Image (tube, helix red, strand yellow):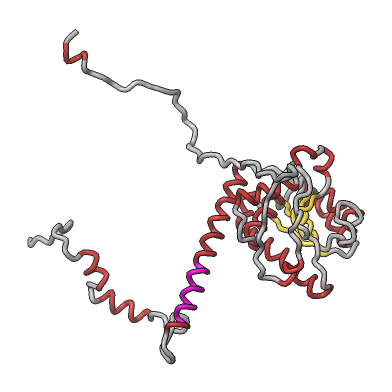
Amino acid sequence: MPSDLETFSYPHKAAAYSYRVPTPPRIVVPPPALNSDALPEISLLAFRSTNFLDSVDYNNLITQNALLEWTYERRREAQMVLPYLYLGPMTAAKDVPFLRGKAGHVPDQGGITMVLGVRQRHSFESKLMNGALRKAQEMGIECRTVDLASNQDLIHSFPETTALINDHLARHFHTSGQVGKVLVFCESGNERSAGVVAAYLMETHTDVDFIKAMQLVQAQRFCANFDDAMKRLLQGYWDILCAKRQVAAVDAASVRADTTAAPTGMPTNANRPKRSLQRDVDEDMEGVTDDDVERFGGRSFAPFMDHSL
């Protein structure tokens, strides 16, 4: 064999070809750590932005190990996620003893004060949900619904559902002096409604990200199902919340710095007039601005040059 052929090489197929669309890596939700009593250990720190949260006790929030004590029949019932927030299926919204607080609640703490149904628009299940809502209305319970075209619409509805829950709890606390209870439900109580509850946990607690939110929901309702699409949806919403909080923190820090450091009578960032449109146009017409000088100053290479014809 000639020597030049001995050194010649060409690529070989090392694995089977795949023609599917590339997908992002899967999001793995690890089980939460257990305490000495073999119970999931999940701590919560809520935003104290509303008055009703001051009277909420988060101690002994998780009282069972759902992995060991869960039974299949419990998927038809609602479970407490927070002392004032319950998650369950559509059958729980029609369970009169549960709605009245006689079953499935901590004794002597009242029943459900609002039901929030998450349903798919123009589906047969959404028509069935009307019966559950009528039962709650007959009992004098406030009823709210969120209609979705698909699960992807959830990320646009998360701020609305969080506001609905907080507004009701604040009103109920203001009128009665007690913390109300909200039941969030969908057809199964395992998918769309579970995503709404997880998003509420992220938005109202300082130490809950999308992983911890799913851990807490599944620790309380073991049958809650977060598929890959829902996990990425919650991850995207968590990124939005982080960005909003960072912007709010920077704005608050700049306002504090301006109000403390600026001399009396000097304008601060909060009351300094904005750049006018005419000022921007004048700077653009000048051709070269200070930013251009800093950016291109000292460069010897010109990507474009003018030539005379």
Q: Position of residue 27 (x, y in %)?
A: 57, 42
Q: Is residue 131 visible?
A: no
Q: Furthest residue to the bottom?
A: 265
Residue plotted at (68% across, 62% down): 162
Q: Is residue 89 left or right of residue 206?
A: right
Q: Furthest residue to the front?
A: 36
Q: Position of residue 48 (x, y in %)?
A: 67, 68
Quarter where residue 284 is shown: bottom left
Residue plotted at (29% across, 79% down): 282
Q: Is residue 130 above or below residue 113?
A: above
Question: Is residue 262 inside the magenta stretch?
Answer: no
Q: Furthest residue to the left?
A: 309
The segment highlighted magenta reads 247-259
Q: Is residue 21 visible?
A: yes
Quarter where residue 144 is shown: bottom right
Picture quarter with the N terminus: top left
Residue plotted at (75% across, 54% down): 61
Q: Is residue 110 left or right of residue 49?
A: right
**Residue 7 versus residue 135: which sits nearer the camera?**
7
Residue plotted at (38% across, 80% down): 275
Picture quarter with the C terminus: bottom left
Q: Position of residue 46 (x, y in %)?
A: 66, 63
**Residue 192 versus residue 246: which sits nearer the camera?**
246
Q: Position of residue 49 (x, y in %)?
A: 66, 70
Decide whether the magenta segment is chiefly helix, strand or loop.
Answer: helix
Question: Is residue 250 inside the magenta stretch?
Answer: yes
